Amino acid sequence: MRDDVPMQLAFDDAQAIVDRVAAQHRMPVERLALARTHGRILAEDVIAAIPSPPFDNSAMDGFAVRHADLAGQGDTTLPLAGEQFAGLARDLVLAQGTCIRITTGAPMPTGADTVVIREVVRDEGDRIVVPAGIVAGANVRHAGEDVRIGDTVLDAGCVLTPARVATAASLGVDQLSVFARPTVAVFTTGDELVPPGMPLAPGQIHDSNRELLMGLLRADGLEPTAWPALPDNPERVESVLRDAASSFDLVITCGGVSVGEKDHVPAMLVAHGEIHFWKVRMKPGMPLLFGTLDRARFLGLPGNPVSVFATYATLGRRLLDGLQGRTQPRRAFRAQLAAPIDKPHARREFLRGRLDAGADGVLRAWPDAATGSHRLHAAARADALIVVPEGPQQLPAGTVVDVLPY
């Protein structure tokens, strides 16, 4: 290994390198119809060209009135002077001492400033009887009260949730500029790996990392491509990975990145690419390898399944977010430890745990006692990663810690 390869990085330093490389290789921008933008990352601010609501309108079915016509005490009788329904502005003018029947979303007649809901009036056909106590301006939605012309309604870098896409639609926007999705190639490595459903010979295990990583990527909106497991053959590893790196934006491998006799991936990347860092002071997942190979960013994850999960959730997902220009932070919480944690080592640790809010409304994190990086079942019964800071730590129950929900 070359002397200039950054190794044994602090976790924060590794994050900073991931951010820098991702920013240098951001995905191109494409303009898509609204229906195709859900879940994507917005590439340009959206500025309102029209107000929302676009005109004063009724928030309820009822009767448009002048509040000044209503008696302060007792009932008020008003003759019905017309009807205004949603969808067609009739340019009605409300005469003093009258009312107009109106439906939800219909434009307010000129002169009207209040809507009395139909449930509180006595409808007598050609007139209504309004009780006392109606608040001035009740049930009226004013033009621009949600969005004014020139407002920035969506910021570049945000995730386009259904509500955000709908906001764009409400302002007449039919297309949005978004960052392209990275193409991702996924590889698992090791002679010991056998696909689920196939019989195991002595010394073999079923390949769980493939399904784990493919599922994580799909949950993040990507459409990854997976190959059969690579054998522990350096020529085969080099040939297949270099071929993938010439066609994909990101190549992810699981296994083969440590210092064992069969760990061929780091040497391949030294010979044919660039290593941005190798090994991070984190647990699980220390052998993490990050680099560039041909046109692709290259992420070499450790082989143990919990290490795959932790490194993807903390650094792999961060890389993908950066490539897509996401500036909106991922959700994170603070929670009280429900049980003590004693960590003797210096690395930042990501413990599996469960989150639970009790009757007191306090969010608590329950660490899982199964801490081995091979304990996939323990990861499956958890729903969060509990972040334990660098350095030896003795954290009693009740300590407030950062947690990353699955």
Image: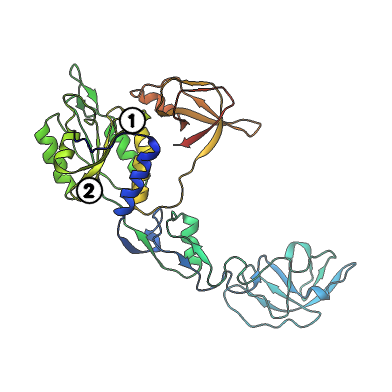
Name the residue: 43% across, 60% down: 156
The amino acid type, in three-letter code, at marker 1 is Gly
Query: What residue is disc 1 on?
Result: 285
Given residues 158 and 64, the one toward you in this image is 158
Name the residue: 19% across, 39% down: 227
Q: Residue 212, located in which quarter of the rendered image?
A: top left
Residue 296: assigned label: 2
Where residue 314 appears, as percent x and y from the top left, is 39, 38
Side (left or right) of 70 relative to 82: right
Where residue 172 appears, as percent x and y from the top left, is 47, 70
The colour scheme used here is rainbow
Q: CA distance from mark 1 to mark 2?
A: 22 Å
Q: Residue placed farthest to the left in the image?
A: 235
Q: Mark 1 packing: few (<14 Cα in 10 Å), some, or many (20+)?
A: many
The amino acid type, in three-letter code, at marker 2 is Ala
Q: Is residue 221 visible?
A: no
Given residues 146 and 259, the one toward you in this image is 259
Where residue 87 appears, as percent x and y from the top left, is 57, 74
